[in-house]
Amino acid sequence: MYPHYKTKSIKKGVTLVEILVASAILAFIGGIVGHWFFLQREYQGRIFAISDSQQTIRQASWAMMQELRTARSVLLPRINSDKSIRSDSKVVFKNFAGDIICYYYVASTRELRRCKVPNGPGTPSIDNEPVASNIDQITFTASDDGNRLIDIFMEVNGTFGLESVFLMNE
Amino acid sequence: MAMPFEDIVEVPPPGIALYDAPAGTFFGPFINTSGSSSGEKFITQGNMPEFYSYLAQHDFRYSLSVSNVSFGDGDEIKSVGILVSWIENNKNMMYRLYVYVPSL
């Protein structure tokens, strides 16, 4: 009665084209997810690096500020004779006990180190451990008439720190 | 970052940029490794490119809120609010610090 009507045969399995399309879609989704994970890891790495740098700056600043704040006087740097500010990569001061203390930057090893010349008998000594490592630059600046204000500018891996210390003891 | 007492005056927001700061402001000049004022360096693109970029990228600025208190006999105290502002992740950030500055 209906000669043109044919019952469709039921297919089993998948064709090669379907597999290729599915693979392409999966690869596309995988690529997006993989790239997102890569970006997240990269972003996380950058955050950790900045955090480490900030920690280095904080620790180094804290150590120097504690000692500088109670120092008797700063020997270097001191403002110029024409009252202009004066900067140096080291700071030398007399601490509350009368010892001469020097914090200085060693460019070759990128370290900040501390040296002490005792008040009275004894030999000058350099601390075994550096105050901080991986420092790109550090500058101590004397900027007031009384040489009681020292600004500390530090760079660690593209992160910057700026602190001011006012000597309370002079 | 030292300034004569009489020069500590109100600096209204948005304040003065730390980069390209004019002479006589807190951050101008910034460093000087020479023995005279001729060697003073400001935070400019030419003098300190990386630090300049960092400050400019986040638009670091400072403003001052100054109140005068006098106890007579020429003695005077300034209450100085230091407001440092910057932009981070498209958000306006601010750090506040208050200090008392005596005239003597």
Image (cartoon, coloured by chain):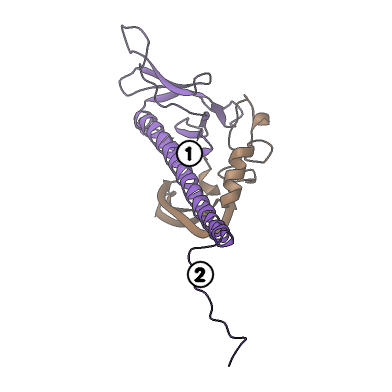
Chain colours: A purple, B brown
Comparing A59 with A147, the one in front is A59
Indicate the chain on which mark 1 is placed. A
Q: Position of residue B23 (x, y in %)?
A: 64, 43
Task: Pick whichever of labels 1 and 2 is earlier in the sequence.
Answer: 2
The amino acid marked with disc number 2 is Lys
Q: As displayed, is residue A57 above or below residue B87?
A: above
Nearer to us in this view, B60 or A51:
A51
Identify residue for label 2: A11
Q: Position of residue A20 (x, y in %)?
A: 57, 57
Kind of residue sitting beneath label 1: Gly
Q: Secondary structure at mark 1?
A: strand
In the image, residue A92 above or below residue A17: above
Locate residue B61 relative to residue A51 in the image: left or right: right
- Residue located at (61% from left, 48% from top): B56
Q: Quadrant of the N terminus of chain A?
A: bottom right
> Badge 1 local density, few (<14 within 10 Å), some, or many (20+)?
some
Q: Quadrant of residue B43?
A: top right
Give neighbour class at mark 2: few <14, some 14-19, many 20+ (Cα, 10 Å): few
Q: Position of residue A27 (x, y in %)?
A: 54, 54
Q: Which residue is mark 1?
A: A161
Residue at (55% x, 28% y) in the render: A87
Residue A100 horizontal/vertical position (percent): 38, 17
